[in-house]
Image: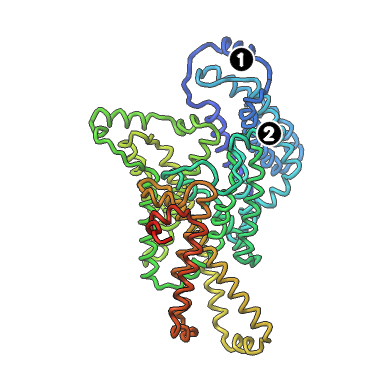
Amino acid sequence: MRASDRWVAWAACAYTVFFLYGSLAPLRWQAQTFDHALSVFMALPGPHWPAAERVDAAVNFLLPLPLAFALALLASSMRRRWVRWSVWGLLWPLLAGLSVSVELAQVFLPARDPSWSDVAAQWAGAAAGLLLFAAWGRRFEAVLAQFSGAAPALARSTQWLGVYLALLVVFNLMPLDLSISPVELYRKWRDGRVILLPFGGPARAGWDFLYELLSDVALWLPVGLLWRIDGRQRSLLAVVRRGLLAAALLELAQLAVMSRVSDAADILLAGVGVALGAALPGWLAGCLSWDAARRQRWLGLAWCLWLAVAVTVLWQPFDFEGSRLMAGALHNALHEVLTRLPFETYFQRGEFGALSEMLRKLLVFLPGGLLLAAWAAGRVQPVPGWLAMAGLAALALVLEAGQLLLPGKVADLSDAALGSLGAALGWRIARSLRAAGGRTASAAAMAAAAPPLRARTTAQRSPGAHTALAATKLSSAALSAAATVGALALLLWAGSRLPGVPYNVVKLMPAGFAGAVAALGLAMAAWWMLAAPLWLLAAPRRQWRLVFALPLLAHALATFVLLRATVPLAMIHKIIGNPVLG
């Protein structure tokens, strides 16, 4: 069996366990005779899909589809043709029998709701999986062979990008309550679930809102990274444009998901994430040029900062109750945690809620594994991977155990397992990024090793070439300034929504489009006040110091005009005082 077939076989086994466990959880069995259960099951009404249950229909349709595709892929690897065709002919009946068996078993579980509608939807999904393999199975086998080959992962970034974008599309279309009815689309817009102005929706505050902003940025960071390292030499601006276009198309498709909110701000946050991901290889190459001691200090500081953020996300609002440490209360809480079935709390959230919570736990711990791997690689004696993963898993357990003292939190071993998985993913990503950064640094060193050729090329440049080079540097500086201002505006706007922020600061950036403009104006003013004096004091502009009062006046006037045009006038009066001389 090929290596790719072994991976598919393991994936099919794991997915079968997920299929069975998800269909039968929480496994509260009620004893009854098989004849009685069969009669109850056969007496159920036939398939019907009312509009209110289209999410269940979509989920049951998609549930057996990957399993059918994987089994068809394994069957295609069999050498004897008659065996291959025989297995193919048995796949759909076997999957159909599995669906009936699972739904029949749900009669013994009072918490579950057996239905012939689910059976029919799963039958259709199994057939769709087999048809999907017939149409694109060979192409998928070729892609899978590239994934399992000896080439490094970064050389296959195009394939990884396709997989990640597919997962991103599925996440944004959950919970699959799709509709293209003009009436329902109008109701969605009327109910305020289509927000055309960035950050123009209802005002939200607190740590959850800040987490939503950061998670929206983090979801798109791998997209920018993979587009930058796929070997096609795209510029940062080109990658950001592609990311904004992809996010806009995805947000447009999300209009058909009735239970989701379509927000133009998600497009802007996706652009920020793509830009950060695209800048990551260059930043990593720059960090590799530091001396080892400096690099280790910064990585250790970054890991401590991540730990503080993780504690804040998992333990806020920090309303610890000491009474939960009493022997009886602690014993009951531990008993509940240890006897709870895996992922039982996730099944109570619905499809989209469970997927979002899983993604949240992965995203919280992924930077921890990434930073720890980068720090461990710089040590004289490298840290074994299993030891680092054991330490991060213990940290996840400790953070989850702390939730036992928080009345608004639910401690769950499944959350700790997901956190450990996220840390492991971060560890693997760091190893790939280190290889990419090393190649980037090597290329830069090779380019710097030929000064005579570069000097000769510079001397032979025409005036037009010098003008083009100056324009390129100017556009690069403008892009850097724009990115700095945008990031600062986002931080100011998000920070003004945090609890405990003074009233006057909150009112500086009100809700809606006006608040976004005010945040951008404040960020531009801050950048202007910091950057313009540095430009004036540069060595080529020393002569301006003789008339320093004139540029100072122009600088102050520009700052005031910028603030007056963007920040509410009443708040300017509150901060600097009401004018008394008109």
Q: Which element type, helix, strand or loop, lies under badge 1?
A: helix
What is the distance, in whole Å, between disc 1 and disc 2 at their CAs? 31 Å
Q: Name the residue that disc number 1 marks.
A: 41
Q: Position of residue 213 (x, y in %)?
A: 49, 49
Q: Where is residue 389 in the image (x, y as percent from the top left)?
A: 41, 51
Residue 91 showing in the rendered view: no
- Identify the residue shown where x is 48% and y is 24%: 27
- Identify the residue shown where x is 69% and y is 28%: 123
The type of residue carrying mark 2 is Ser
Q: Which of 98 and 181 is in front in this view?
A: 181
- Identify the residue shown where x is 53% and y is 67%: 481
Q: Position of residue 298 (x, y in %)?
A: 38, 65
Task: Tell me the number on the disc at residue 539.
Answer: none
- Callout 2: 10 Å neighbours few (<14), some, many (20+)? some
Q: Which of 128 and 561 is in front in this view?
A: 561
Q: Earlier in the sequence, mark 1 or mark 2?
A: 1
Does residue 459 appear left or right of residue 569 in this picture?
A: right
Q: In which quarter of the image is residue 454?
A: bottom right
Q: Which element type, helix, strand or loop, lies under badge 2?
A: loop
Q: Name the residue that disc number 2 marks.
A: 179
- Between circles 1 and 2, the one closer to the viewer is 2
Q: Quadrant of residue 78?
A: top right
Residue 367 showing in the rendered view: yes
- From what the image shows, is residue 319 above or below residue 485? above
- Callout 1: 10 Å neighbours few (<14), some, many (20+)? some
